Amino acid sequence: MLLSYNRSLWYHRILYLLVAVALVAVVYKTYMSSLRIQKYHQAVNDLELGRLVLAEEGFRKAAANTSLQYKTKEIEELLVQLQPVSQIIDMLKQVEEELRVSDDEERVAEMLDVFAKYNQLIGEYSAKGDSSTLIFQEAIVYYEINERFTATLSDHYKRVTKGLQSQLNKKAFAEEQNLKELLLLHNAIAKNDPKQAAEDLALLESYENARLNAVLKEKGFADALAETARINKIYADSGLSFPLIATRTEDYAKDQLQQLFDQNKIVEYIAMAQAFQSSPDWAPILVNVPGVIAKAISVWIKQADQAVAAGQFDQGIGILTKLGTYTDTAPRIRNAEVRAMEADPARLLLRAAPGRSFNSTASFQSQAGAQSVVLGLDKNTIGLARLFGDGTVGYSEGVLDEGITVKSLTLAQALSAQGQPLVLVDGASGSRQHRYLAYELQGNALRKIWDVQADRYQVERPGVLLVDNTIDGPGQQSYYEYQGGRYNFTRIKPDYIEISLNNLRNYRNTKVRFTCQILTADGNTAVVSLNGEYVILSGNFSFKPGNAVVTGKWIGDSEIKKGTQSIYAFQVEVSALSQ
């Protein structure tokens, strides 16, 4: 019986619960139905008063309330009529939603894109000048779109400026998100707010000065230029004119260059100047730095020129060589080297043959087709170095015979039948005053074309030498003629002059040879007729009448008696006779 009572009690409770739920449902439906009716009539009122956005909002909410089918057809028709209003409201709600999403995710760039889109809509609807303009203006006021943007952007402004200030205080510059977002906000908003713009620039200048202090102190020159260029690009890409970066970088570059100039560190200076010139970001912009570099280069070039003028060739060439990696100093170097080689022949040989060690040298100017010529002897190697007018150097070698003791080296261009440079070696001789060895430039080498021991020589004409007291002609003069690429002995030079007997009067005390007709002969004496006069020949010969070839010397005057008449006679001492 107790079980039956409990079951009855449970059924009653269920019944009460169902009745309560049904009552709540009836009350809710009654409330919602009343609310639909209220929204409808309020919307109708708004529509009559021209509040189209409020009317559209009311009709939309009434339509969404399906608790009561009240004025359903009228609401649908009115919403169709208000469709242009609905489109504007939907468009603004989409903008509002995009703003909310970018705000929630703190994506400033996207937020500003939404802001730009919103401003574009304002411009477009303002330009229409029709009913849609009024609807748009009513909608942004009703939904407080302007206020939402202002509040949102202000919040992010505060966030990024606070973050950037914190980085500045901590000297923490690695993270650049705050900086980039501040630049975005500044360019989008502060341009219309002078006070905000000034505050932004003050913070940015403090931040960048602190960052640049660290960068320019800690990094090398090239890396510092690259980093400041990267920072400057951030500002350039944002569209903000921010000359501080360029000014600080230019001051830094000039200061670093000046320090090296003051220390006369040319190599390091040139490396730094090249690093600057190779910077595609700064070289075209920092227009004062190239002038500083050019001035320094000019000073050093002047120092080099002064050193060369003072005969300090190594110093001058050293400066010019260092500068040559930055600017063209090749003509100056060539001129300095020429002057150095002219002043010191050993330099020319060293330049021409760096592997040789010449211990005997001779130098000449404007000979052998060159501006300067130096001869040198390295053991048995003869070196010929020539400095030409264009600064180039020519070098040739020849081989000296073993055992030659060299007394001197000289150029003897007159000895060359080919007009080529010719080196004459004057060597010691055991039996004569000299041993002459001539080396002519043939191709790229010095070739020996003459080797003779003699007392002296002279050039009788091109390709013909007259040599005194040679081995081939002791006590006489010998001819050497250029044949087959060298000088060869050809003959002994006669010690008389070949004349006609009629010209004898011109050769007193001169050994001559002539042909004559002997009239009479008496042992060692003979008489020759000469134009009404006579020639008396005397000598250690057995003269006989007839033709004769006589070599001798007119040594005096005599007479021959012919009756009572005395006739002049030339007294000739005969040294050779041929009959």
Image (spheres, rainbow, N blue to C red):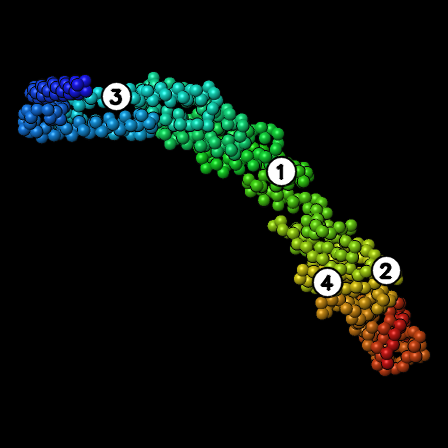
Residue 402, relative to residue 80: is it above or below? below
Q: Amino acid at mark 3?
A: Arg
Residue annotated with mark 4: 447
Residue annotated with mark 2: 429
Mark closer to the observer (4, 2): 4
Q: Amino acid at mark 2?
A: Ser
Instruction: Pick whichever, 252 or 389, lies toward us.
Output: 252
Horizontal arrangement in the rendering, residue 524 relative to residue 512 (left or right): right
Disc 3, SS: helix
Q: Quadrant of the C terminus?
A: bottom right
Marked residue nearer the N-terminal end (1 or 2)? 1
Residue annotated with mark 3: 148
Instruction: Compute the Cα span from label 1 to label 2.
Output: 50 Å
Q: Quadrant of the N terminus?
A: top left
Instruction: Compute the Cα span from label 3 to label 2.
Output: 118 Å
Mark closer to the observer (3, 2): 3
Instruction: Compute the Cα span from label 3 to label 4.
Output: 103 Å
Residue 112, relative to residue 301: is it above or below? above
Mark closer to the observer (1, 2): 1
Horizontal arrangement in the rendering, residue 575 relative to residue 135 (left or right): right
Residue annotated with mark 1: 319
Horizontal arrangement in the rendering, residue 52 relative to residue 256 (left or right): left
Mark closer to the observer (3, 4): 3
> Label 1 crowding class (10 Å Cα cut-off): few <14, some 14-19, many 20+?
many
Q: Estimate the x, y position of residue 136 in percent, counting from the top left.
A: 17, 25
Marked residue nearer the N-terminal end (1 or 4)? 1
